[in-house]
Image (cartoon, helix red, strand yellow):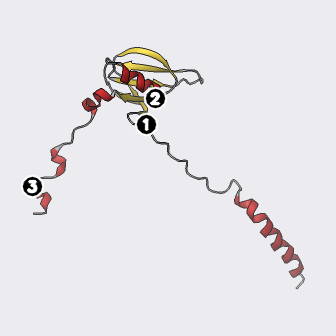
Amino acid sequence: MRLAPLLAPACALALIAAPAAADAPSRKPEKPTEQAVPTGQEPGIYRFGATYSVLPGDTPTACQASCAADEMCLAWSHVAAIDGGEGRCELKRGGGHVRKDFLSVSGISPRHEALFTPKPVQELDGGPDADGE
């Protein structure tokens, strides 16, 4: 019974400290929300393909608009600067090969997207046994 007078204040202290512990760093962090990717942009992709113009570019969206306005442009790549400076916008005559690059965002001109869209293959739809025969 000598412990009862000590337990009561300890329990009260624990109840008071509980809300502060809820915000402690040991709590599991929330998942970051995914940002929507604008239509026609490929984040993390650099496209090779006959670069004919390099322009200063602040954003991938501005680079995409420059390509859409230029009839010669088939594809584009925006490369961000590492040091926080101004990025560059590369306009290209070809779609070229792609490479993963965390500083780049690329895309195809809307006028030419059909050339680079994969066509569905009939074989994948099923064959004569697809009906369960």
Res. 128 mark: 3
For the point 73% across and 60% down, which residue is it? 21
Whole-Å distance between the Cαs marked 2 and 3?
47 Å
Q: Is residue 130 left or right of residue 88?
A: left
Disc tally is 3
Q: Earlier in the sequence, mark 1 or mark 3?
A: 1
Does 62 sit left or right of 51 as displayed? right
- Amino acid at pointer 3: Pro
Q: Residue 123, relative to residue 42: is it above or below?
A: below
Residue 124 placed where, x, y %?
19, 48
Q: Give the mark nearest the N terminus, 1 or 2.
A: 1
Residue drawn 40% across and 33% down?
41
Instruction: Answer above or below: position of 108 versus 25.
Output: above
- Image quadrant for the C terminus? bottom left
Q: Secondary structure at mark 3?
A: helix
Please tell me the numbered disc located at residue 61: 2
Question: Which residue in the rendered view is the most extreme toward the top?
Answer: 52
Q: In the figure, 74 relative to 131: above or below?
A: above
**Image x and y of residue 23, in percent:** 70, 57
Element under disc 2: helix
- Which of the two residues, 100 or 92, is positioned nearer the viewer here? 92
Q: Amino acid at mark 2?
A: Thr
**Disc 1: which residue:** 38
The amino acid sitting under disc 1 is Pro
